[in-house]
Image (cartoon, helix red, strand yellow):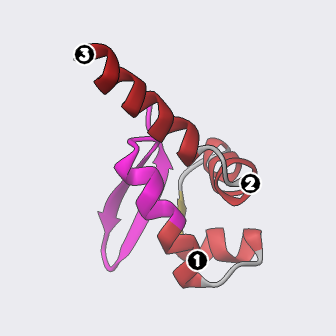
Amino acid sequence: MARNSESYELACGFGLLSDWKRVSGILKMLTAGPKNVTALCKGLGQKQPTVSHHLGLLRMGRLVVGTRKGKSMIFFTSG
């Protein structure tokens, strides 16, 4: 049973990395340093709902961490 669970988690991880916006966009930008959603949107040329959706998936996958700073959320890569 443990193998099935590990396989499922692995498949979910690959699923997170399957979208080019998440990998080449958001993760690449965050490896250069923490950013808020506005900075990510400008850098990617994407609208806020799209970037927020991808960030939510990356947060659930524990690849990105967010911390509140005033009214903004600052995101950075975990690890």
Real-space Cα separation, disc 1 to disc 2, in angstroms: 13 Å
| Location of residue 14 with respect to 16 vertically, above or below | above
| Furthest residue in direction left, as rendered | 1
Label 2: how many residues lie within 10 Å, few (<14), some (14-19) or many (20+)? Answer: few
Amino acid marked by disc 2 = Trp
* Numbered disc total: 3
| Location of residue 57 with respect to 6 vertically, above or below | below
Instruction: Based on the picture, tell me whether residue 74 belongs to the magenta stretch.
Output: yes
Real-space Cα separation, disc 3 to disc 1, in angstroms: 34 Å
Q: What x and y, as percent, mark residue 18?
A: 66, 47
Out of 18 and 4, give the one closest to the viewer.
4
Is 10 on the left or on the right of 69, as rendered? right
Quarter holding residue 43: bottom right
| Location of residue 21 with respect to 4 vertically, above or below | below
Residue at left offset 46%, top offset 40%: 12
Numbered mark located on residue 24 in the image: none
Q: Secondary structure at mark 1?
A: helix
Q: Are marks 3 and 2 in contact (CB under 8 Å)?
A: no
Label 3: how many residues lie within 10 Å, few (<14), some (14-19) or many (20+)? Answer: few
Residue highlighted by disc 3: 2
Q: Are marks 1 and 2 in contact (CB under 8 Å)?
A: no
| Location of residue 7 with respect to 56 vertically, above or below | above
Numbered mark located on residue 50 in the image: 1
Image quadrant where one finds the C terminus = top left
Q: Secondary structure at mark 2?
A: helix
Numbered mark located on residue 20 in the image: 2
Residue range (magenta): 54-79
Q: What x and y, as percent, mark residue 51?
A: 57, 72
Is 21 on the left or on the right of 59, as rendered? right
Is 2 on the left or on the right of 66, as rendered? left
State which mark lies toward you, 3 or 2: 3
